[in-house]
Amino acid sequence: MKRNLFFDIILEPSDYRDMLLRELNTEVFYDIIVKEDTDHGFHTNVKLPNQGLYVLYKNCEPIYVGCSSTSIRTRIGRFIAGVRGTERLDENHSAAYKYIDVFGQDLNGVSIKSIPLRKSDLPDYLEIQDIEKMLIEELKPLFNNETHYGYTFEKGVKVVALEEQNNARFI
C-alpha cells in the first residue's frame, strides 16, 4: 500500500495478495466434468461466478490462472474445447495446447477454484488483469505465458526450469 502526494492510500495488486490466497486456500477443489455430447460443455458441482478470477488445477497443482469480466464458464469451455480439439476456427486457448503437450487430452483430475471479482470492486486505476498477473506471479501455474518462458516441457511427466533445477515441478 502506498500513499500519493495528498496522503491518499493507493492500493496495488499486491495489497490483494493475502486475501486472495486465503480465499483460494479455503476454497474447495471443484472437479470439472466434461459433457462428451458437446464441444465446450462441462459441469461442476458449484455455480461459477460470471466475473472474477479462476485457477485451473491438475491433481491439485495450479496449471492456469485466468480472469473474465463476462463469463468464466466460457473461458473454461474454450480451454476444454482446445484440449479436446473441438474448438471453432475463431477460438484458441494457448494453455490448452500446452496442456496437450504434457498431459495429452486426458482431462481427469482437472479442477477449478474461483473468486468472484468485478471491476467495480476495485479502485478506478486497477484492472482485474492487474490482480490476475499478481496471482500468476504468486502461484506460478504451469501453462500461463508469464510462467511458461524459461521452461521446457517433457511430455506427461515434469516441467523443468532452465535457470534452476530447484524450480522443477513434478506432476
Image (spheres, rainbow, N blue to C red):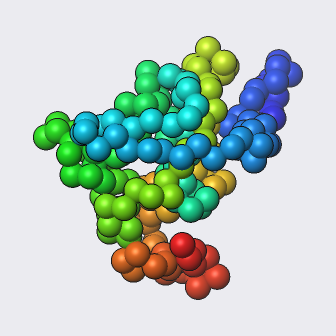
Image point (21%, 52%), residue name: 85
The residue lying furthest to the left in this view is 89
Front residue of 149/43: it is: 43
Q: Where is residue 140 in the image (x, y as percent from the top left)?
A: 58, 59
Front residue of 45/142: it is: 45
Q: Position of residue 19 (x, y in %)?
A: 78, 37
Q: Position of residue 15 (x, y in %)?
A: 77, 37
Image point (58%, 50%), residue name: 136
The residue lying furthest to the right in this view is 7
Quarter holding the N terminus is top right
Image point (40%, 75%), residue name: 156
Displayed quadrant of residue 47: top right
Front residue of 124/62: it is: 62
Vertical side of 67 occupied by 49: above or below: above
Q: In this view, does 97 lie to the left or right of 139?
A: left
Whether residue 169 can be seen here = yes
Vertical side of 119 occupied by 166: above or below: below
The residue lying furthest to the bottom in this view is 165
Report how many numbered discs are placed on residues in the image.
0
Q: Where is residue 171 in the image (x, y as percent from the top left)?
A: 54, 72
Whether residue 125 can be seen here = no
Image point (56%, 35%), residue name: 45
Q: In this view, does 19 lie to the left or right of 124?
A: right
Vertical side of 169 occupied by 84: above or below: above
